[in-house]
Amino acid sequence: MKMRKVYAILLSVSLLSGLLAGCSGGTSNNKTGDLSTVQPNQSVAESGNDSNSKPIKLEIIEPGNNLPSPDKDMIKKELDKALNIDLNLTVYPSGDDYANQLNVRMASGNFPDLFMVSRQQIIQFSKQGLLLDLTPYMDELQQTVDFIGEESVKKGMVDGKVFAISKSSQIPYNTYWIRKDWLDKLQLAVPTTVEQLAAVAEAFTNNDPDDNGKRDTFGLTGSKFGAFAPVFGAFGVGMPGNFYVKDGAVVNSLYDPAIKDTLAFIREMILSGSVDPELLANTGLQHQEKAIKGQAGIVHIDWPNMTKEQFVEQIKAVNPNAEWLQIAPPSGPGGQYDGSWDIGATPARFAIPKALEKDPEKPQRIFDLLNYISNPEGGSLLVQFGVQDIHFTLNDGKPVMTDKAGEVGHSWLYQFTGRPEMEYLQTKFALQSKEIQFASDQPRIEALNGFIDNPEGYNPADADRYIEEELAKFIYDKRSLSEYDDFLKTLETTMNYQLLLESAKAQLAQLGFGG
């Protein structure tokens, strides 16, 4: 509650100053043209404004895949019709390709009308004067603000000004999954403490849980350090590099007093031979593949990759008796948390180029689009589920997918302001409703990294690589934990981590974190 008040105060001050600037005769060039002809909750077609005029062309670019051709894209057709636009969406399967294309276009002045940006790109492009300051227009985006929430608005701000619209927040997907049939075979109970977790992992490795007479299984797998997220949580420690509030103060996990005990516990699990020997080399879904093949009995993974129909079929094809059970994080000396969850993160941000000030009709139509897809009684249902009575129906006001839902599997590409995550997922994946709710309900340490901008002179890529390399040495017993403080000193100096620590705590203090 405290932070909600802080966000509201900060946002109100920022928006008020922006609105006053926008209305002042002395600064009228901050708001070119009349962009208020359509109410936030109306589409152009509904308002009757220019509904018979030529459609406004809008070009939008973002990373993504599986976008159908325009003639088969029913989401595009419905948006075009409702808003009197000709929407040209281009998606790039590779995030690197997208970043390169965007940088080239921004440098050459060939701006898209709406485009996805990272936090660092918002800072860079706004300081270069390339992004439209949305602060004076927030009253016209009220429907969007109501939809994404004031906390999400804050995530698109730089120096108190709004330069991007951030999507509404997501929910956590990951938990531990365990082979219940292996537990039953070895007459073991579901582990509820980290000690029990370690014991079960050892039993899965040494006691032939698949009953094939071979020592060809191991206890735990996952994606790098993510495999131990609940173990970190059991010691009350965030994932490596996380900032969070502990005992009233902002703490970085690498400096948490409990970090050494956490690493020591993980080291013992690894030395027992019960952990995937290729853990830190796992990429993509290799940990999922090992679990499905029956190589591992515990995996930390997201619910889609264990419960979607195609994966359930794969699991049964390997072993019809395999039974995976989703479990709560084990408790430990620091509590019970399924790792950490960054409350400052956002799925994506979208910006508008400042150059569009010269063409006020386009920004207005973009505002119309954002408001329309943010209206729960309007376009929000369209970009979530498709066309009503074709791809979904309403049953007592709740969407129910039809057998034609596959025609709009790409609808997520049009969710520029996000979606009501829980309702959306439980509608689209009704068979997985219980697992979705379970994953979301698990306690997690609230990380704050999404609120932090990297200071100049700090290279996160270099620091992150060094952190992962050295922590790997500690947990694989290649470096003594007695040298942990030496590791921190090198990190602070050679990697400029001290600069990050000071900047992060100052930024978070301004937001009211840490007392």
Image (cartoon, helix red, strand yellow):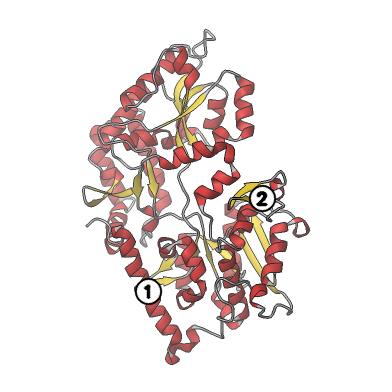
Q: From what the image shows, is residue 49 above or below residue 149?
A: below
Residue nearest the observer in this picture, 94 or 150:
150
> Which residue is denoted by mark 2 in the rendering?
392
Residue located 43% across and 50% down the image: 461
Residue 267 position, x and y percent, is 33, 27
Q: Within the image, what quadrant is residue 354 found in?
A: bottom right
* Residue assigned mark 1: 14
Image location (x, y in percent) of residue 465: 41, 44
- In the rendered image, the quadrant that contains the C terminus is bottom left
Find numbered disc 1 in the image and state the secondary structure of the residue it sits on. helix
Residue 238: quarter of image = top left
Spatial distance from mark 2 to mark 1, Cα to Cα? 40 Å
Quadrant (top left/top right/bottom left/bottom right) for the N terminus: bottom left
Q: Is residue 378 above or below residue 36?
A: above
Residue that extends furthest to the top in the rendered view of this protein = 213
Name the element at disc 2.
Answer: strand
Viewer can see residue 423: yes
- Locate residue 128, reporting x and y percent: 48, 73
